[in-house]
Image (cartoon, rainbow, N blue to C red):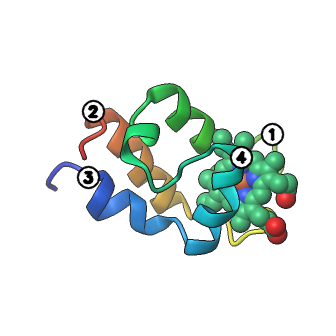
Amino acid sequence: MPQVSFSADIKPLFRAIDIAHMKPFGVELDDYAYMSNPDNANRVFATLSPHDGEPPTMPPGGPYWTAAQLGLFMQWQSDGYKA
Ligand code: HEM
């Protein structure tokens, strides 16, 4: 599979409402410069992931990302945050 890219594979996973609701908090889900900072990407990923049997914190109430979507995000990170 070609390397996972932010514009083609990751950005489309965020809904318009996700992007709009997070901007006032300084979380720029649609911004490559923000998302390609590993600290930011890791924080975003943590909110999308279930932990200790609890559902993800984001988006509040769901719909939560599937294992395949979370896997794609991890692949994007390990591919080196391609644009
Ligand atoms: C660093 C990452 C993130 C932080 C710190 C964060 C934090 C927050 C906070 C504090 C709120 C408002 C309070 C609440 O409704 O619980 C909120 C709302 C929201 N967040 Fe996030 N969030 C993050 C990532 C995300 C991601 C990755 C998504 C979607 C994929 C998302 C989608 C939303 C939506 C849709 C709302 C509005 C919910 C509503 O008003 O009904 N957030 N977020």
- The kind of residue on which mark 3 rests is Ser
- Is the CB–ligand 1 distance for label 4 below 8 Å? yes
- The kind of residue on which mark 4 rests is Phe
Ligand 1 shows up in the quarter that is bottom right
Q: Which of disc 1 and disc 4 is earlier in sequence?
A: 4
Q: Give the Cα separation between the discs numbered 1 and 2.
A: 28 Å
In the image, residue 23 sits, relative to residue 39, either above or below, namely: below
Q: Give the Cα separation between the discs numbered 3 and 4.
A: 25 Å
Q: Position of residue 80 (x, y in %)?
A: 27, 33
Instruction: Give left or right: position of 73 versus 6.
Output: right
Instruction: Give left or right: position of 62 versus 1.
Output: right
Q: Give the Cα separation between the discs numbered 3 and 1.
A: 30 Å
Q: Which of disc 2 and disc 1 is earlier in sequence?
A: 1
- Is the CB–ligand 1 distance for label 3 below 8 Å? no
Q: Which of disc 3 and disc 2 is earlier in sequence?
A: 3
Foreground: disc 4 or disc 1: 4
Q: Give the Cα separation between the discs numbered 4 and 2.
A: 26 Å
Q: Which residue is mark 2?
A: 80
Instruction: Report helix, strand or loop for mark 4.
Output: helix
Foreground: disc 3 or disc 4: 4
In this view, the residue in front, 20 or 80, is 20
Can residue 58 be seen at all in this image of the molecule?
no
Q: Which residue is mark 3?
A: 5
Q: Position of residue 26 (x, y in %)?
A: 64, 43
Q: How many marks?
A: 4
Within 10 Å of disc 1 (Cα), the crowding (few <14, some 14-19, many 20+) is: few
Q: Give the Cα separation between the discs numbered 2 and 3.
A: 9 Å
Residue shown at the point (41%, 68%) measured from the top left: 12
Quadrant hosting residue 52: top right
Instruction: Report helix, strand or loop for mark 2.
Output: loop
Disc assigned to residue 18: none
Instruction: Report helix, strand or loop for mark 3.
Output: loop
